[in-house]
Image (cartoon, grey):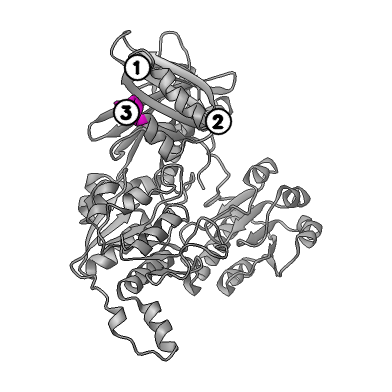
Amino acid sequence: MNVMAKILVTDGMAIEGLDLLKQAGHTVDNKKVTADELLKIIGDYEGLVVRSATQVTDAVLTAGSPTLKVVGRAGVGVDNIDLPAATSHGVIAMNAPLGNIVSAAEHTLGMIFAVARMIPQAHAKLTKGEWDKKSFVGIELDGKILGIVGLGKIGKHVAQVLQAAGMTVIAYDPFLSPEVAKDLRIESVTVDQLLARADFVTVHTPLTEQTRNLINTERLKTMKKTARIVNVARGGIVDEPALAAALKAGIIAGAAIDVFAEEPIPAGHPLQGLANCIVTPHLGASTEEAQVKVSVDIANQFNAYFATGKIINAVNVQLRIDPAIDGYLAAAEALGAAVVQTLDEPLKGLEVTAKGALAKYDTKPLAVAALKGALAKISDQVVNFVTVNQIAKDRGITITSSSQEVADGADQLMVTAITASGRHVIAGALVANQLRVLRYNDFPIDLPIGGHLLVMEYPDRPGMVGKYGTILGANRINIARMEVSRIDGRGDALVILTLDDPIPAAVFDEIKTLVKPNKAYKVSLSASK
């Protein structure tokens, strides 16, 4: 390939990254442009490097076609890139997902030390000329319990540093294997156990329907009055009004928050001006080193692509798969995402079995797609087809694929999640290019899958549908589809509801209280933030 490309950098880039691009022989224009100017000139470039300011819209991608080949985000988030439009125009969208790990971890550490010793508050008072030691008696970290919610790369880094500082680390990560936890000298606990025991709680999990307002009014009340909360992950995981109320009432001792549900925060935000709350404007990745790392990473990725065609950290590129079963790649991803959200314990392995005509093809890409779907729901890292295997390895999760001949030759894809207590199965098939789930554990079903699901198992008895149907209706949540399955006509029933909107936690709890199911899960197959 070895293309000498013309590359536009619109939001700035560290000199180290710019030099790498130029040394590879590319022409690099590093300049700020308006949205209108970008539309006029983008058709002259094969590559575009952005950070968060430039909006790479469908109009930009259309104007760049067919010259524009790759867009790179010098950072993690790609919210400012229209990924479906990029894919439709054949433009590769890359990011640099690993460059800010240390910076985010170190900002977390700084916030923990700061909230323990009230450093910003003491500084602010002394700059006003007030020498006040009595108001700022802090606590030591040594001997305290650190609770980490989400044990990805950032959480592990924080754990290692604070273990060295004398802290005992416990962690809530539903998909952390016991083997990995043991190696890290970390005790795996439930989220409620963590909140009740920890002196410091730090959050390192993606924002999903399952983690939104994970730390809320009820859970704050279970914490020690001396506890402190730190969030340098995603706004919305900690309920901000509830946290403000808890801080004012002395339910917990302090907080340090770097990320918010709305950014920039609006005037009068409830966490502003609280004496026991430290706030920073989303500085987790704001270090010189992180900016250099992401710039170098994206430059190396561009150089590899234009030199050899190698695609690294692409967020919109699927695996190479036989066109005959191309549709099953997305199906496998959806099945993996669905089954992992119905587990009550850590995922240890994933098995993908192809039946019927599917058995004639290489099933490894389907297994990777299922794993990608599962990990995207449980990992705080950017999960794509490049990083998925390494993330699984780090978590101690195995992956296998196989093929199975069946007498009737019907195509079917079965995804089996393996946990310490057993196997959890979901199977489906494409019917008229639509994925239909045909089995969930031992229950036979036939349901198109997508959007937001409510999955429940409960003792079969009259009137149950009316109970949860009434609650959903009262909360204006529409049931799009419904499937009820029984194995032998008696005993437990499985119900799966496809809903137009996600179920709020309070409504979910109300349904569980009334129905008293053996098992109940909220499953979201919409894109995570």
Horizontal and vertical percent position of residue 21? 62, 66
Q: Position of residue 180 (x, y in %)?
A: 25, 49
Please name whichever residue, 249 or 163, is drawn nearer the observer in this view of the structure.
Answer: 249
Q: Are marks 3 and 2 in contact (CB under 8 Å)?
A: no
* Magenta stretch encompasses residue 514: yes
The residue labelled by disc 3 is: 519
Residue 181 sits above or below residue 452 on the image: below
Q: Amino acid at mark 2?
A: Asp
Q: CA distance from mark 3 to mark 1?
A: 11 Å
Task: Provide the residue span drawn in magenta.
Answer: 512-520
- N-terminal of the pair, mark 3 or mark 2, is 2
Residue on which the image places disc 1: 493
Lower sequence index among marks 2 and 1: 1
Residue 354 part of the magenta segment: no
Q: CA distance from mark 3 to mark 2?
A: 22 Å
Q: Residue 320's image quarter?
A: top right
Query: Can see residue 514?
Result: yes
Residue sitting at x 52%, y 64%: 294
Q: Which disc is residue 189 wearing? A: none
> Between residues 177 and 89, which one lies in front from this camera angle?
177
What element does badge 2 sit on?
loop
For this orientation, the residue located farthest to the left is 143
Q: Which residue is mark 2?
A: 500
Query: Can you see residue 337?
Result: no
**Residue 90: x percent and y percent?**
67, 44
